[in-house]
Structure formats: structure tokens, C-alpha cells
Image: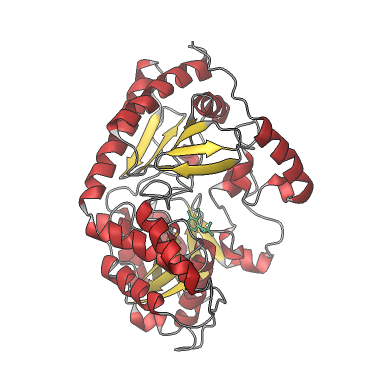
Amino acid sequence: PTTAPELALPTSAALFERAKNHIPGGVNSPVRAFRAVGGHPVFMQSAKGAWLTDVDGNQYLDFINSWGPMILGHAPDIVLDAVQAAIPASLSFGAPTRREVEMAELIKQMVPSIEKVRLVNSGTEATMSAIRVARGYTGRNKIIKFEGCYHGHGDSFLIAAGSGALTLGTPDSPGVTEGVAQDTLTVPYNDLPAVQHIIEVNEGQVAALILEPVVGNMGLVAPQEGYLQGLRDLCTQHGIVLIFDEVMTGFRLARGGAQELYGITPDMTTLGKIIGGGMPVGAYGGRQDIMDNVAPAGKVYQAGTLSGNPIATAAGIAQLTYLQEHPELYDELNRITTRLADGTRQIAAELGLNYTVNQVGSMFSVFFTDKPVHNLADAKHSDTEAFGRYFRAMLHRGIYLAPAQYEALFVSTAITDELVEVYLTACREAMREAHGL
Ligand code: PMP
């Protein structure tokens, strides 16, 4: 196998050493520490389009895209221009502004199941608030979530959570009380009878069922045929609020997210990332009769000093408007991603590895197992050691992948056919290097 030359990362290494003295684990979000893949993180300096540049001047093709929001690639002019135009008018008012209204209108147009929407500052805030509202609305305490789904770091969700909580092997976090944990019921993904059973055992006690309609946080896992409709029917039958957490899938898998793609209408939806174009933002919304329980319209309290921030809404409106006006962009994103996913699958097959590559729209994952992956137990068949070697081999060839097996990759419109070839060439070499082939 060809081995890529070692990357020179002296500035990243030095910054990480400094960071560890001041920041827990040296990072402000666990996955960034590269714990699952070895080595130390790469500190970034700038990015444009498909390319990242680190603090040592190395360049990488980006397949994380800030975990989703940079769907148009990095620093697109339309978003930067909108932000620059907004800056002189002040960075925050803590009072209502015109753009908050425009943003709400835009979200409602693109995601028709949302009749009213509240802006917050992160996906975590969106999901925490959504279940509070569902509890207030139903007068019930329990929620159902799925093993390996991640909904941010709210206490109620750190039970059998995916993403960084899964990678670090601490899905049940210290600091979450037993009382909270008891109100979170967990079941395997893609198993309808399991959901039916847990609802029946807890009849009349379940406020909400929350899920990623396409899971990005145990690697990419698609809902099986009929699964989302089955959940919809169960929730309707038992008076349970169905919440689609579309923080990753919203405005990405289609203009209207996974709910548009699969034709299923949830009662509530949580959003984040993409709607801020890279600025810190989130949102939750849904049926009017449910959302009118939120203060000051109703009694369920939820607030935020910086919510609806003028710069975040400027960036978000610019990006969402672009997505709305360019529906053709989704077909192209999907075509490019299919080339990446199929190409990876073929390379793994040629090498006799037969790895499972899951793809939905512009999200995909390479599971280092030859078994199909429909849930967390399946995902855990993956050879995470080999994945770590592959990740490093790709990084050294200038390809920036998610630094853990249990994460999805996000493709931006900046990836051209030519760049697909760059990726596939690196993939073939890195697969061989990682397996000594
Ligand atoms: N829900 C989902 C589906 C997510 O993927 C994430 C973050 N990756 C969150 C919620 C939490 O969002 P944030 O990191 O913005 O708090």
C-alpha cells in the first residue's frame, strides 16, 4: 500500500497542548478531540467552498461542513454579504425585529407541518424546549427516544444517546438524576413492535416520542419501509406528540426535510444548524394548538436573551432563501453524494471488505462491517480500530471526515465531479493502508 507522508501539524499540536490547560479535554465539544481515532485535533484557520485550511496551512476537502449547516460550502458570498449588511445596525437588541418575522414565515413555507415556530440558539435548546411543551400540552411526564439517536445534551436525552456520548462510551452521563432518567424510555430504532409494547406498558403516561427521522448520530441509518408511518399511527392512536428532530436533516434531505422526503407529518419539529447558515441558532415548531402553549401565549415557559439574534437571522434568511429558490440543487447534491457513497462501497467490495455504506440524500456513512446497519446494535458491529486507521489515512491525504465511526458525513454543493474523483482516489489508497492490503 502507498502510505501518505505525515502531515506537519506543529501549530495544531501546540494549540492543543495550551487548550488542555484551560478547556476540559482541550475542546468545546467532545467529538472535536479526535479521541475515537487517535492523534490530536486539527485547528482550523479558514475555509472557502469545499476546502478547509488549518493553522499550519494544510488544506482539506471537507465532508463535515460544521456537522451540516454549510450546505452551500463554506463562506458563501450570499450569506457573508447578508451578515456584513446586518452588522452595523447592532449585534443584538433583546427586542423584536423584522427578520424574526421573515424567518418564521420562511420556515413555515418550507416546512408546512410547522404552524408556529420559536427561535432558540442551538439544537439542544430546541429539543429541550419541544419536550417541555409536549409535556405541558399532554399533562404527561414520559418520553420515548431511540437507542443511538442524539438530541443534544439536555438531561432527558442523555440516555442511550448517540454521537459523542456514544463514541466516548458514556451514554448515561453522571449528573443526570435517576428521576429524569426514569422518564426517558428507550427502544431500538426500526423496531415498531418494541415501540408498541413500551407504549402499552406505559399507557396514558407518554407525552412525546422523539426521533431523528433519518438518524445521523449512530452513523447514517435510514428508516425502514413503513417505519415512520407506523410511528405516526401509534402516536395518533395514543395521543402522543410525535417530534421529528430534524436538526441535521431539515432543509438538507429536501427543502422540507425528512418529513417531506418520506411524506410523514409530525406534530412538532426541531431544527438547527442549517437555518443559521453557520451562526448559532435553533428552532422548534409545530401544530398551532400545541405551540400556543408556549409563553407568553401559554403557560409553558421558554425564553432567550439572544434568541432571534439579528446576525443569526440575517445569515439564516440568506441561506434558506437560496435553498428555497434553487430546488434543483437537491437533485445535484444527491447525485454527487450517490457517486461518493457508491464509489466507496465499490472500493470496499473490490478489496474484499464489503463494508456497508448507508446513504440518504446528501448524508452518508461508511460502516466498517459487512452486515447491514438498521439500528445501534448493527452499527456496533463496526471495526472502530480499522475506522480510526482509515480516518487518519484520509486526513493525511487531505480529506476531512467525521472523526468517529458513529457519525454521518455531510456533503455540500461545493463538491464537484472532479472533487469526487479526488475523494475516491484517496479512499482507495486509505482503505488499503488501513487494512494493510
Ligand atoms: N439533534 C440532533 C439530531 C443533532 O444532530 C444535534 C447535534 N448534532 C442536536 C440535536 C443538538 O444540536 P446542538 O449541537 O446545536 O445543540
107 sits to left or right of 294: left
Q: Residue at x 49, y 24 (%)?
A: 397
Q: Residue at x 45, y 45 (%)?
A: 65
330 sits to left or right of 140: left
**Residue farthest along the right direction in this orientation:** 21
Decide if residue 376 is in sight here. Answer: yes
Residue 340, by quadrant, is top left
Q: Position of residue 428 (x, y in %)?
A: 41, 19
Q: Position of residue 10 (x, y in %)?
A: 68, 30
Q: How is the image coloured?
A: secondary structure
Q: Position of residue 418 (x, y in %)?
A: 30, 29
Q: Residue at x 53, y 74 (%)?
A: 92
Q: Taking 357 as reference, is 348 above or below it?
A: above
113 sits to left or right of 118: left
Q: Position of residue 16 (x, y in %)?
A: 70, 40
**Residue farthest along the left direction in this orientation:** 328
Viewer-side residue, 189 vs 19 = 19
**Residue farthest along the front direction in this orientation:** 88
Viewer-side residue, 236 vs 408 = 408
Viewer-side residue, 209 vs 385 = 385
Viewer-side residue, 147 vs 158 = 158
Decide if residue 229 is in sight here. Answer: no
Q: Residue at x 48, y 48 (%)?
A: 66
